Image: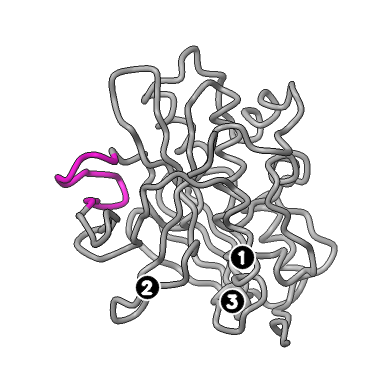
Amino acid sequence: MHEDARQPAHAPTPGWTGAYLERIGAARPPRADAAALRELQLRHLMTVPFENLSVHLGQDVVLEEEKLVDKIVTDRRGGFCYELNGAFAALLRGLGFRVVPLQARVFGDGGSLGIPYDHIALRVETDDATGPWLADVGFGDHALHPLELEARTEQDDPSGTFRFREAPQGDLDLLRDGSQQFRLDPRPRVLADFQAGSWYHRTSPDSHFTRSLICSRCTEGGRVTLRGRTLITTERGERHETELQDGAEVLAAYRDHFGIELTHPPVVRPPLTV
């Protein structure tokens, strides 16, 4: 176990938390309590997209909090789980929350488990007598609110009913509406532990991130997603798909729905071969 998982290297410089809060449209909470955590997670999910564009734009992904925060705040971008939860952890620490990264393996078809360090989630302790909480802004269509880590009963959320179930070797399986989501290892980690998992998902032909383009975020009534050239909107359970006709429409969709300004439409790049 690391001596102190709460003090990462390459932390953002002082004075950046205000800009991050402005980015997600949130006020600075007076106290690092459960209500503030819930609001911050929801605002993050509704403003910062889950996206894998860097994989196909030839951009490096550096798992250092300063660079992750800069990508979200200055570049007005999103990212995938390592980036989003890495940056969110920095924000929470900057606001007085106690945060430890946890590694998880995502369940695939047939109940198979993904690689170790397949996903990063956050164990968060607050200043009130609640929690600890599992906070997660990097799993795409997932829980909108933090989940109580030590509860084994069903937890209702706007996106479904969640429950933690004991798993082998002290792990926890997270279920959503009875379906397995990921297997969580409760031992503390640090951001650098996820380097290999991040590299795998950026380079392996077996990773779904190298095979497709995805950009998605929550909305007031559902979700908006751009998958390649297909724009998908869900509003109060009604799903609509629109095929964008050209690059100009793709660029406009990234700008109008996600606030991402690009000079050219991204295309799927062949994965790295060695």
Q: CA distance from mark 3 to mark 2?
A: 33 Å
Of 168 and 232, the residue lying toward us = 168
Q: CA distance from mark 3 to mark 1?
A: 35 Å
Secondary element type, mark 2? loop
x 56%, y 28%: residue: 93
User: Which numbered dot is residue 243?
Assistant: 3
Write down the residue under mark 2: 113
Residue 196: percent from the left, percent from the top? 61, 65
Secondary element type, mark 1? helix
**Mark 3 surroundings within 10 Å by alpha-carbon count, few (fewer than 14), some (14 through 19), many (20 or more):** some
Residue 227: percent from the left, percent from the top? 57, 71
**Mark 1 surroundings within 10 Å by alpha-carbon count, few (fewer than 14), some (14 through 19), many (20 or more):** some
In the displayed structure, 260 sits above or below 153; it is below
Identify the amino acid type marked 2: Leu
Task: Count every numbered label the image shows and give the total.
Answer: 3
Which of the two labelled residues, at mark 1 and mark 2, occupies the earlier sequence position?
2
**Mark 2 surroundings within 10 Å by alpha-carbon count, few (fewer than 14), some (14 through 19), many (20 or more):** some
Query: Does 1 sit left or right of 110 as displayed?
Result: right
Magenta stretch in the rendered image: 149-164
The colour mode here is: one colour
Secondary element type, mark 3? strand
Which of the two labelled residues, at mark 3 and mark 2, occupies the earlier sequence position?
2
Is 45 within the magenta? no
In the displayed structure, 95 sits above or below 11; it is above
